[in-house]
Every structure is written in C-alpha cells, then in structure tokens.
Amino acid sequence: MSTRLMKICCAGFSALLLSACPSRLESVDADLSNPGALVLAGKDKDKIFLANRGEDNLQVVALGESLSESSFVNGPIQFLPLRIPCGGQPEKLMASDDGDYVVFHDASHNALGVVDAENYILRLGFGASASGFSFATWLEAPAALVAGEACSDCLVHFFVSLPKSQKILELKLLSEEVLGIELVRVWSIDSGYPEHLLYTENNILFASDQQAARVWKIDLGAPEEAPTAIDIASRAGALTWSEKSKTLFVARPAMEDVLAIDLSGDTPEILDLNARFAPTPECLLSCEEEAEPLCIQQHLADQALCVQAEGFDAPAEAAPYTALFMASKTQSMTVVDGAASDTSLAIECEDAQEEHETLLVSAGLDGSFRFASLDALADG
C-alpha cells in the first residue's frame, strides 16, 4: 500500500558492498571480542570508539576521506590495533561536547570512567590516577547514558537512568584542570522506573518506563513541576526525536511497531502512521463472524480492517491502529534530517526513484535496516 517504507537486510547489503569493493575487507579488519557500544569522538569527530567488552578495553577506528582509507588505530605493537584498557568491561559510551573525551560505564566496577580521545589514555577509572563516579550508593547499574544541552562550565552535561531506584541522575564532566564527574541533581520518578533516555533541544528529557506502558516527559527548565506520563499502550523501547516536526518516536518491541507522538501543541497527540505506511494486507477477515478464519493475522495493521460486501470497514471490536508496523522488534532508531546537512537520500522503488529529506532509520532484531520517509508527515 505504501512505498515509503524500505527494508534492507544487513547480510545482503553487506554482501553487495563487499562484492563491489572486495579490497575494503582488509582496511577495517580487527580482532574484536564481544563488541558493544560505539560513539563518534575526537576534535574533528573523525574517530569511532568501540567497546571491546570481552577484553575490557576500547578500540578506535580513524575515519578517512573514504571507506577504504578508514582503519583501526594501531597500538605500540606494529600492525596490531590499539587497545585502551578501561579497568573493567566498558558498556555505554558518550563523547564530551568538544569530542576530546569519551565517558564510559565500567560494568565490572559499576562506575563511570573517562578516556582521553586524543592521547588514548585512561584519565578516570580503575587503573587511572583518579577514580571515576561510582554507583555503589544506588546498588544498581545505569540503564542509559545520554548527553544534555551544551555546557559552558563543563566538558559535558549528561543524564543517567537508574530504573530500580526510580531515579535519573544529572551529572557534569568537569573541566580539564580538575577532571572529574560531579553529581548535579537527582530527579525522582516516584511513580515510574526510567530506562531509555532521550534529550531534546527544547530542554526536555524523555524516559521510557521499564515496568509500565508509558513514557515520562521531564521539563528540565521547570524542576518544580512533576514529570508527566504519556500512555503508549505497550512498554517502550528505543526513543528518537524529530526537531523539525516536534515528534517523538517510540519503539514498542512487543507490538513490533513504532508510535509517533506529536508534541508541537499543549497536549500530546498520537499521529496516524498506519494510514500512510501500512504494509500490504496479508490477512483481512470478514466483518461478519466466521466459524473458521481462512488465514491467521500476523500484524495489528490487518486487524484494524475487515472485508464486507461493500468493501473495507473497521471491525466493531477493534480499536483504530495508528502505529508504524515494522514486523520486527526495533532495537535502535534515529531521525535523519537531510535538509539540515544539505543531503537527501534517493530510494529506488521499482522503476522510479524517490528523493527524501527526512527519514526514520531503524535497526531491527531481525538484522534489517528500515528507512521510512517522514516528508509527508512533516507536510501534514
């Protein structure tokens, strides 16, 4: 029904790239052990730091002008990739505002550490000259680590979620002269368990709830106001934000879809993505009661329609379905605004080619990337 949702299988896509450029295999070869999170850092944002969890270290990819010129940074031993010891297993990663430092969570000691992104030295953490920030007081590991607004008196201003404690910690990485991590404020979510975090440019922090079907909205500019809850009918996963359309996208893993919430007005409004992005129907049942259905419905988009003599209708007992059905559990996603970067993405669809400016890019548990054009959504 719609050509605006495109799915690319990672394995097939990689095979296509390698068959076209087989020489690129050696340029990114490295011996990784249980790789985890990655983050873009460096003064020129030209280095990718990757958590090598199996060896308790970080490795670094230096980006070149092309893929063939990108490679892992070598260590003291020639031809072997650099390994930056972290004192424990590195998990979540975050870069400072200027890209000079990388903050990581040391899962082995449940503490935050800091690596110098220019000199590749552990500055804070176990094994460094100064310790990092410990979560021993809260007796749990952070679920998320996200940067906030640009900081004038620190290297990075960020937030950490602690679901079991029902807290969100606000912290700062202090200046180079006295490098350290300072606790600024503890935000309490008395009725919820904050997990995934998302910071938006209007000084709003969103948090999914680990135990309930809702997303919390926290106005950081009005700390006296209690967080407000947005009901999403299923537990939330990944979160992302479109600054252009003021829309919050919430992945709902159990329902294998993504919900879009318009926050441009005073009251949150659920947008109808199914009308624009609904997949081709695979199993529509009769609007009349059937003793034995002829097929088994696989997704909620089909359940929102039924067939009768005059055409299509909505089943009497079915609630309208408004989400973007993905047919997979969305692991991560982001909104790409091509207009902001003077780029656009051309997608070939049958014999035609479509140009898109704003895309919702997601990675699914089934190993696929999906691209959904949001241009029509932005146009209303």
Image (spheres, rainbow, N blue to C red):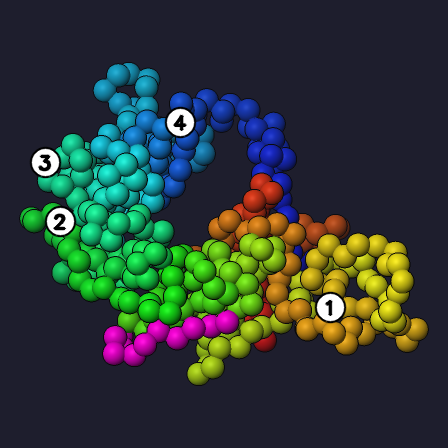
Residue 33: give its label: 4
**Magenta part of the chain:** 221-231
Quadrant housing the C terminus? bottom right
Looking at the image, residue 261 lies above or below residue 331: below
For marks 1 and 2, give the one nearer the viewer.
1
Looking at the image, residue 198 lies above or below residue 203: above
Query: Which sits earlier in the primary sequence, circle 1 or circle 3?
Result: 3
Image location of residue 324, percent across then percent down = 62, 62
Query: Which sits earlier in the primary sequence, circle 3 or circle 4?
Result: 4
Query: Which sits earlier in the primary sequence, circle 3 or circle 2?
Result: 3
Label 3 CA crowd tier, 10 Å (few <14, some 14–19, many 20+): few
Q: Is residue 169 left or right of residue 291?
A: left
Within the image, what quadrant is residue 210 found in? bottom left
Residues at badges 1 and 4 in contact (C-beta under 8 Å)?
Answer: no
Q: CA distance from mark 1 to mark 2?
A: 54 Å
Image location of residue 365, percent across then percent down = 56, 44
Q: CA distance from mark 1 to mark 4?
A: 45 Å
Disc 4 secondary structure class: loop
Q: Amino acid type of disc 2?
A: Gly
Label 4 CA crowd tier, 10 Å (few <14, some 14–19, many 20+): few
Q: Nearer the viewer, residue 19 or 93?
A: 93
Query: Which sits earlier in the primary sequence, circle 2 or circle 4?
Result: 4
Residue 73 in view = no
Label 1 CA crowd tier, 10 Å (few <14, some 14–19, many 20+): some
Q: CA distance from mark 1 to mark 3?
A: 60 Å
